Image (tube, rainbow, N blue to C red):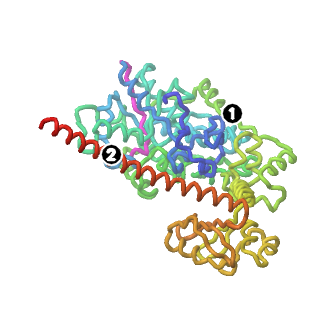
């Protein structure tokens, strides 16, 4: 499991509902053999699919076992704790939380917010020294991945600085030595991908969910923490960086740090909001410095996929702001620069742009025809397949990302056609009716058996849909009895307009839909079948009688033999 990608599918649990495709902002899901898999090169690791999958098939990689192995070795392991811990572990006093991490074996706990403060300081210098233009924050790895993969024209707008996590990891290594191990703990799934790509700085990433499960496993609960180890952040506590997990938290810290008046700030959270907001930005002639803070999770990191707190965004915001007010004000100056050109260059080339396939209109139309969409009117754009339009679905099919059976309307038609063919080829009369005795479907044999003008009507209205059964056959009350009782009626001979017929009525949906099968007993093949069936029944009954007689005779013979033997024995004694 350690080598799995950060988000993956437990295929045995996948129920091919396509909800992950509907919710995925970049459609990074491939359907193969009715099972959904995540395409790593397309994914931005926002983790949304793990929250909405109804069967729990979408999983976040569990790195706890990997971290446990690190702790068993002799190298010190430090925690980079995301500032949203305040909202997640509100029941733990800060000193208890730090002590609890110490009980797990960590050498020290430091706030990722320290790296955020350093990023703020560097961004402030960058904005004040740069000319006008658009500047996009590098703080959210999912947002950065989205721009590089799907908006490559804006890649140059991303500020060439580390994310707060990588800046903090570099700071920890400068403070405590290059041979330490750094483990991030926070609400973000994308940090697992970041730790994979930049393992020279970050050794592993856990979510708050991972940590909670680990605490429970070890019995480390609020009020039960032993305060016999480190209980303070190293090397000191953060200040303004604590605001970073809030929507607009980074811009708030920048406003306090940037003295230049010609900088405009905008903060946008939520993937759909980001996608809509970035439309047209590449063509914008910007004569001011515009800084964009983009956070993929709605409301900011406090609502990340790795967080368990169910409190509302307002409550979480207040918890973060109150924690910030309790910290010492100001940004700590460490003399540490996070602008390493070599690392920055590697960082900027990790995600490759996703090339949109360029298919011809004839290819798209051919794909649409395979699912029965031969005209614009057939393109329902219902979204049942998970894609926004039938054309998007057709392109996904050509790309190998989707399968034909994902189209709900197509599969419904296929199922209806199969049922209709089977129904029409049956040699018996078949009729399905609802609880009002209105016909849902029937075959032509039923219309012929019912007689009168029904065969002609069936030609005009195939299936006799909506017709009233009470006006068609005399024995309609049999259907009513099965509807009301829910008990099937099998193999009943009836007289229908002077003709002897065999009728079976059974339930399709209890008290709602029943199916009737009618056979004309005067038809030669039916008569022959009935004769054979009844001969077999008589034979079975007679064989049963013979077996009973044989049993009784055998029992009597044995009893008689025993009595005679007893008499012989008595005579010999005399």
Look at the image and say whether residue 318 sits in the magenta stretch: no
Residue 174's image quarter?
top left
Q: Where 506 falls versus 50 (above or below)?
A: below
Relative placement, left or right, of 114 versus 458 is left
Q: How crowded is the residue under tag 2: few (<14 C-alpha within 10 Å), some, or many (20+)?
A: few
Which callout, 2 or 1, points to the residue nearer the camera?
A: 2
Tell me which residue sits at (84%, 50%) in the image: 365
- As for residue 82 lying within the magenta part, the answer is yes
Q: Would you place residue 502 above or below residue 202 in this image?
A: below
Name the foreground residue: 314 vs 462. Answer: 462
Question: Closer to the camera, 483 or 318?
Answer: 483
Which x, y percent locates residue 525?
72, 59
Give the image location of residue 42, x and y in percent. Answer: 66, 38
Viewer-nearest residue: 265 or 180: 180
User: In this rendering, would 514 be left or right of 164?
Assistant: right
> Disc 1 designates what residue?
352
Q: What stretch is highlighted in magenta?
A: 74-86
Whether residue 142 is visible:
yes
Q: Is residue 459 above or below residue 571?
A: below
- Secondary structure under tag 2 reads helix
Q: Name the residue under label 2.
A: 557
Reply above or below: 471 against 132. below
Name the N-terminal-most of marks 2 and 1.
Answer: 1
């Amino acid at each position: 499991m350690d080598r799995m990608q950060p988000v993956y599918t437990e295929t045995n649990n996948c129920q091919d509902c396509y909800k992950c495709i509907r919710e995925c902002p970049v459609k990074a899901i491939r359907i193969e053999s009715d099972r959904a898999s995540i395409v790593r090169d397309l994914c931005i690791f926002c983790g949304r699919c793990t929250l909405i999958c109804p069967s729990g098939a979408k999983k976040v990689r569990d790195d706890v076992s990997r971290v446990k192995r690190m702790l068993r070795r002799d190298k010190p392991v430090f925690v980079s704790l995301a500032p949203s811990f305040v909202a997640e572990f509100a029941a733990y006093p800060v000193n208890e939380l730090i002590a609890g991490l110490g009980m797990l074996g960590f050498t020290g706990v430091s706030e990722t917010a320290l790296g955020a403060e350093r990023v703020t300081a560097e961004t402030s210098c960058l904005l004040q020294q740069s000319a006008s233009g658009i500047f996009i924050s590098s703080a959210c790895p999912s947002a950065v991945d989205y721009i590089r993969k799907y908006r490559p024209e804006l890649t140059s707008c991303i500020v060439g600085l580390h994310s707060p996590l990588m800046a903090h990891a570099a700071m920890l290594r400068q403070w405590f030595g290059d041979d330490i191990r750094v483990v991030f703990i926070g609400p973000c799934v994308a940090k697992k991908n970041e730790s994979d790509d930049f393992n020279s700085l970050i050794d592993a990433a856990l979510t708050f969910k991972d940590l909670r499960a680990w605490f429970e496993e070890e019995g480390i609960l609020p009020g039960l923490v032993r305060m016999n180890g480190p209980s303070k952040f190293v090397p000191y506590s953060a200040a303004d960086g604590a605001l970073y997990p809030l929507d607009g938290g980074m811009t708030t810290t920048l406003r306090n740090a940037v003295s230049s008046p010609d900088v405009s700030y905008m903060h946008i959270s939520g993937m759909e909001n980001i996608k809509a907001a970035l439309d047209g930005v590449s063509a914008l002639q910007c004569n001011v410095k515009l800084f964009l803070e983009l956070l993929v999770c709605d409301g900011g990191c406090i609502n990340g996929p790795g967080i368990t707190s169910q409190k509302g965004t307002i409550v979480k915001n207040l918890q973060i702001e109150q924690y910030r007010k309790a910290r010492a004000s100001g940004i700590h100056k460490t003399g540490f620069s996070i602008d390493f050109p070599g690392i920055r260059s590697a960082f900027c080339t990790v995600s490759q742009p996703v090339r949109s396939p360029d298919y011809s209109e004839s290819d798209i139309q051919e794909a649409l025809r395979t699912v029965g969409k031969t005209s614009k009117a057939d393109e329902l754009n219902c979204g049942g397949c998970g894609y926004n339009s039938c054309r998007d679905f057709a392109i996904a099919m050509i790309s190998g990302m989707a399968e034909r059976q994902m189209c709900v309307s197509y599969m419904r038609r296929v199922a209806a056609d199969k049922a209709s063919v089977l129904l029409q080829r049956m040699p018996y009369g078949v009729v399905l009716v609802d609880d009002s005795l209105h016909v849902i479907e029937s075959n032509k044999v039923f219309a012929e058996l019912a007689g009168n003008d029904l065969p002609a009507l069936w030609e005009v209205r195939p299936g006799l849909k909506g017709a009233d059964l009470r006006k068609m056959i005399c024995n309609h009350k049999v259907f009513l009895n099965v509807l009301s009782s829910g008990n099937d009626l099998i193999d009943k001979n009836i007289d229908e307009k002077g003709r002897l017929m065999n009728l079976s009525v059974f339930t399709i949906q209890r008290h709602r839909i029943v199916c009737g099968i009618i056979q004309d007993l005067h038809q030669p093949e039916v008569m022959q079948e009935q004769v054979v069936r009844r001969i077999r029944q008589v034979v079975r009954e007679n064989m049963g009688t013979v077996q009973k007689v044989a049993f009784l005779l055998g029992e009597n013979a044995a009893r008689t033999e025993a009595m005679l033997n007893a008499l012989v024995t008595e005579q010999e004694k005399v």
